[in-house]
Amino acid sequence: MASATPSDRGDIAPRSFNRLDPRKLDQADLAEAYDRVRRSTEALIESLGPEDQNLQSMPDASPVKWHRAHTSWFFETFILKPHLPAYRPLDPGYEYLFNSYYNGVGRQYPRPRRGLISRPDQAAVTDYRRHVDGAIQQLLIQLDPPTLRQLAPLILLGLNHEQQHQELIVTDLKHAFSFNPAHPPCFGTRHEPSGQNAAFDWLGFEGGLFEFGHEGPAFAFDNEMPRHRAFLAPFELGSQPVSCAAYLAFMDDGGYERPELWLSDGWSWRQVEGIDAPLYWWREDGDWWHYSCTGARPVDPDSPICHLSFYEAWAFAEWSGARLPSELEWEHAVRALPIEGHFADRRRFHPEASAATGLTQAYGSVWEWTSSAYAAYPGFRPGKGAVGEYNGKFMANQMVLRGGSCATAAGHLRASYRNFFHPHQRWQFSGLRLARSAS
Amino acid sequence: MASATPSDRGDIAPRSFNRLDPRKLDQADLAEAYDRVRRSTEALIESLGPEDQNLQSMPDASPVKWHRAHTSWFFETFILKPHLPAYRPLDPGYEYLFNSYYNGVGRQYPRPRRGLISRPDQAAVTDYRRHVDGAIQQLLIQLDPPTLRQLAPLILLGLNHEQQHQELIVTDLKHAFSFNPAHPPCFGTRHEPSGQNAAFDWLGFEGGLFEFGHEGPAFAFDNEMPRHRAFLAPFELGSQPVSCAAYLAFMDDGGYERPELWLSDGWSWRQVEGIDAPLYWWREDGDWWHYSCTGARPVDPDSPICHLSFYEAWAFAEWSGARLPSELEWEHAVRALPIEGHFADRRRFHPEASAATGLTQAYGSVWEWTSSAYAAYPGFRPGKGAVGEYNGKFMANQMVLRGGSCATAAGHLRASYRNFFHPHQRWQFSGLRLARSAS
Amino acid sequence: MASATPSDRGDIAPRSFNRLDPRKLDQADLAEAYDRVRRSTEALIESLGPEDQNLQSMPDASPVKWHRAHTSWFFETFILKPHLPAYRPLDPGYEYLFNSYYNGVGRQYPRPRRGLISRPDQAAVTDYRRHVDGAIQQLLIQLDPPTLRQLAPLILLGLNHEQQHQELIVTDLKHAFSFNPAHPPCFGTRHEPSGQNAAFDWLGFEGGLFEFGHEGPAFAFDNEMPRHRAFLAPFELGSQPVSCAAYLAFMDDGGYERPELWLSDGWSWRQVEGIDAPLYWWREDGDWWHYSCTGARPVDPDSPICHLSFYEAWAFAEWSGARLPSELEWEHAVRALPIEGHFADRRRFHPEASAATGLTQAYGSVWEWTSSAYAAYPGFRPGKGAVGEYNGKFMANQMVLRGGSCATAAGHLRASYRNFFHPHQRWQFSGLRLARSAS
Amino acid sequence: MASATPSDRGDIAPRSFNRLDPRKLDQADLAEAYDRVRRSTEALIESLGPEDQNLQSMPDASPVKWHRAHTSWFFETFILKPHLPAYRPLDPGYEYLFNSYYNGVGRQYPRPRRGLISRPDQAAVTDYRRHVDGAIQQLLIQLDPPTLRQLAPLILLGLNHEQQHQELIVTDLKHAFSFNPAHPPCFGTRHEPSGQNAAFDWLGFEGGLFEFGHEGPAFAFDNEMPRHRAFLAPFELGSQPVSCAAYLAFMDDGGYERPELWLSDGWSWRQVEGIDAPLYWWREDGDWWHYSCTGARPVDPDSPICHLSFYEAWAFAEWSGARLPSELEWEHAVRALPIEGHFADRRRFHPEASAATGLTQAYGSVWEWTSSAYAAYPGFRPGKGAVGEYNGKFMANQMVLRGGSCATAAGHLRASYRNFFHPHQRWQFSGLRLARSAS
């Protein structure tokens, strides 16, 4: 992006508008938040060429260019068209082309073919982003404060939506680049492994009837609500995410060849797909290497393991004589912790060792698979209108992950945040933390 | 089966050995229970020819002959081989051929090819059953009472296992026969529809912290344990399973064409598979017909709807402005009811209307899809050894169904019983009951 | 078949009605030919149980029971319905169920599901055969001689059609039985390998403008006509089919690992399907075994190699520095030979060594892949009506094989006979003979 | 391409170096031919953006960028590396990345993933082309005349290879752009339909023993040789390619719904793929439209029909009461005609009407499907070394097309030229001309 300067780049994490009551954000707050989030998307992709931005390596992933356009479409569709009467779309064909899955808005261009759309090209998408940005800033100026207060939650939804797509830009392009035999770097700056982990420890938690889910005026997705009670038996959590060293021990112990460690569907998946290592790993002269966002690297034993499917995480836990935590155990355990960690603002885009003690790296580093199927909380009601398709219709066949990763925007996470993927998917920075029931 | 007489057939539901403490069953009790369950399998299939028994219409289903052999293999593998030193297998090749999925026992013949095994033929499988039956009866006579008490739970597991396969014999062969354009009857006796349903009602339940799962000495599967506490918010349940009349109203209202009613995965399934009606339904001159175990029949509006996938059940509930119950809501609601209903002993093999009021047809008639993903209860431990593969390794991607069906053996069910299938599967007698959160 | 006696079995090859002008066959000739062909089908399957007869192991193959019914359907559809006014079908549903691919007759039950039809069972199919047999014999008696002369070619088509299905009964059931880990025998009598081959030789043929295709009044399929001229350059043919010993040398020399020996489509097929040996072969303790119609046997080096795809035959020829013959070269070379060889009447159902010299085993033993794509001869016209679908519509993507095999009915072959299969198919007794252009 | 000027563009068809004896071309001739062919590739793609050049819409097609690189790789691999000792590859990774299918050179990057290679980007590929171009020109200067005479055939092979890829650039990108709902133009200049066809006529040809294939010193591919004799019966050819008007009559007469018109494999293909019109056609308000290289257009009745599969061409011929010509009939009929027609130098990239009489549009306009399977001519020997993989290994499952198309480079064709595709493929400009046997 032409207007990005080096100093911008150090600053892509916007301040935490997500921690405040949206209705108390004024026009300047919203304008600044909007500007920072949108600029951070452009800063993220500034070293990518037009060909890079158009790649789609599987139906689950989308081209970078599509992400840049779709996030603009989101603001156009849910904010500009209904609330800015003078708004004129840049191109009427974009409504169809950049709708992801909102049936309430209309038909969608088939997802597996997004990579076949060379036109609009990346320059036209940049124009589209500017067009939408100009209109949003105009809208923020024009609206009277009461209307703005009403719209603020939707604007924050759009910003959080864009942050989610920032993470997908990283994971989707990493997946596409992994097919390039030259292992080109795609994101971030290269660092040496950051040292050694603290010793592993088990941390205990009392059982009881607790409250879960989001509460309060600050932004949250509909799937984090309503706040509700649930009962937990006493449990223990591992002090840190599982490391590559631990995972290598599982592999050396025949972890990928022993059906008794695997769920039945997981074992079938492993056999059909020929899986015998985490995604992006390969063996070279007896050593394990992996493709990272900064290129090919030897596996660092102290880094948290990532790019695991739920099936692999489950098998590892079984091998360890432990289990995965439920999403409610996880939420209960981290509730009191500050929301700090290794997020995308570090620009490493790979998890690293941590010498900290206590319950460490709960936020950032790697998404942690839980044992919980993604489902509605008791009393769940999706948002009104097409925005109600955001989360609710995916509540089948997926498992919850918690905590965010090294590719998640700083300021985006909270204790009640629920991510979800199908159990075989592993192109996210997905790892695990062990749990066990207190004896 | 040569020794079955008409009077036997009216009597295929064995008395409720499942309600007693297995360790209090003596040799005569066990011998009688064993004999009755095993004979009821043979009575079920007595009108089937050799070609019928060998059909396999999809990888999910198995040939009748295979079920008859596999249930014998179960007794041979887990009881005779370890506990009857003099036991000699009839054919050493059966260990591989009739192992379903127990990796702890050894490799298995590929499931999708079971229908390619013409030899051993059905007569040889009858011999195999007699061989195992003779050895089990011999074992029961030989064992001293303390050893018998130890073995009794495993024998009851074998009998419950066989009852489950009796139900699969019905559903699997019905599926295979559905491909025959002549719609031949396969099981049961033909009856006229049995009348009208009582009026639909909502029944309310208080919230609170309750206990769930199986408790006590009587038989239960490992997945129903341990007994544990969970919190329920107040809720309401429909008084009866959803009827065909209600489902037809959903269809008439465009239920299969409106993506907003469907889960995302469900909508994809519907589109890819071209689904626009329940399994086994077709339209003829403006009327809906279906293939039942007794042949082609017009759809009876008052019968509970069945052969739905979870996706269809979910869409119907959404269209109704309601939802599916969780498995714990279901269990809590039925706990006090007597375990009575329309089971396989009625030999109808299709659900029927009920004029009863209150919470009706919870047991029997149709399996009821719940909103709960099949998962381990807190503190779950699978059984020791290969038997531990019975339930635990399927705890991913499947949804819980409750209550049994018109094809379930009488005496087999209880309040804590958990059945589970993948959300797209619908060749079981699967329907639903509506729920809603109390306002 | 109840009426078959051991002496019948030695006699299943009917005398050569195929060598005569059909219009000169009288009622008694036709009745005898019909009776012998039909009885030989039943004699072939007399040791098969009902389950065996219902197996279908791939869409390319059909159940034995289906072959028995379809050949009866052929007489019913093309002879009885149009020519015997009093004829009543045994079951009106059979018209749909047992139509193979004649769109001119009506819709067909889907081929891949033929194995799902358990009813009519094999006993009902036996009744169907008797019903048709009785009606045909009645028709032969009733018709006046001129009408009979007109119908005779169609009756002979029906008999040759049935002979083709006799061969398919053998190859299709062999394929199905190959999935049974017990390797049960299915057809024929077990013999020791029959000795050593004569030495291999190259036999030369002059070039020139020659005539090809069938001529004369005797029966032939439409695809063997019209008689036409084509030019051949001088060529040489191998004196015998390629032996297992020669093929093992190809395998030992890395034949399955060297892409330069393969056609591009063949190499892809080999990789996708994981092919590294002929069909039905496996290695045990360093030796090659194969599943034959009489059970598991060690590979006999002197037997002609069989169960090869066109791709494998082509790669072997390439490795040999030779090529496959064209179908016209083959026809030209064998024209003068007597039509004798190892056919199904030997009841071995596997090719064997031959000590004969000269151009040997051209007829019988193994079908020989040629380099010729199956196509219409110049001026080809298919038969009138639905019978015209017999051959012509398959003239794409298939390669011609010549000469018949050990599973072909004796009396069925001639020099101009053209068989055809897709290049990847290998469940027929398909081998090859080498050719090369004369220098 | 920066150095291309408008005058260049009118001139992209190089003079006919293909008509001369390569050994008589001197250094200047070869340098000019090389320069013109290579520049015409760059002129062809000058309006394409980087995203356009990276698209791959199916495994059969390749990105434009890949074509530009692979044609350079061809010169590098077969000419520069063996014959210019000082040559240094620009990037050693390109040998693997841009090898199409030459196993003799080494392994290849998987064809279906060519569109996932964003780096090298199109600018780097332009550098690669310049690097190779510089080295070739240097080689041409350095080599002494006798060596040059030896190399000339290989250089001409490289140039003809590049011309073939020029055609694929057009057809592959047209296919990719067809998925863009905006129907953007990709190649050529838009013209109004060019008028009316002359009346259709049948033209007769005598039979006899004729010679076929290439002869003489000028360039030809190995598959056009050796010159050989074959016998033709008398036949007739349609005077012009089949027009859209004729094809629309076939469609209106139920051509896509009548199985009796189709080959069996063709009918299956039609059903499985849901084919009911030529590729790129759709219906809008009762009119047929199609996507052309210059964007969406109404179907012009007088244009030759194109983008047909062999199956569709065959069904049309059957419906017409005619047949496809054999490739030898075609070659015999056109031998005396001048090699003129509607080639790529017209920059229309779509066939057009012709008012000419006699045997018209045999060259250019549309490739004409023949009834001939692609196979070796008698005595065929592929070229030595890896270049021998160019044509020979594709001689299975493909049908021959003759005559070139509106996307073929002018000067590239001749009477003996054989193109070949699988019968279901239709993204080339493939149509047909009718034939019939003389009565």
Image: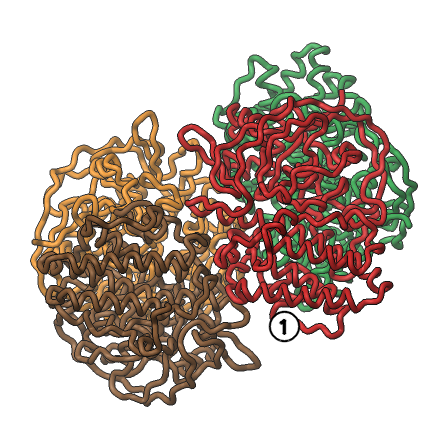
Chain colours: A red, B green, C orange, D brown
Residue B421 in view in this figure:
no
Q: Position of residue D232 (x, y in %)?
A: 18, 72
**Quarter in which the N terminus of chain D is drawn:** bottom left
Q: Left or right: where does residue C288 sit relative to residue A107?
A: left
Depth order, front residue of C57/A120: A120
**Residue type of the residue flagged with mark 1:** Pro
Q: Is residue A251 above or below residue A140?
A: above
Q: Is residue C372 above or below residue D318?
A: above
Q: Quadrant of residue A103?
A: bottom right
Q: Quadrant of residue A94?
A: bottom right
Residue D307 in view in this figure:
yes
Q: Is residue B107 above or below residue C140?
A: above
Residue behind mark 1: A92
Depth order, front residue of C198/D125: D125
Q: Position of residue A190 (x, y in %)?
A: 52, 40
Q: Quadrant of residue B23?
A: top right
Depth order, front residue of A223/A124: A124
Q: Left or right: where does residue A281 sit relative to residue A412?
A: left
Q: Position of residue D53 (x, y in %)?
A: 43, 62
Depth order, front residue of D377/D24: D24
Q: Position of residue A339 (x, y in %)?
A: 74, 39
Residue positioned 10% across, 57% down in the render: D144
Q: Is residue A186 above or below residue C331?
A: above
Residue positioned 42% across, 39% down in the render: C177
Instruction: Name the subunit of mark 1.
Output: A
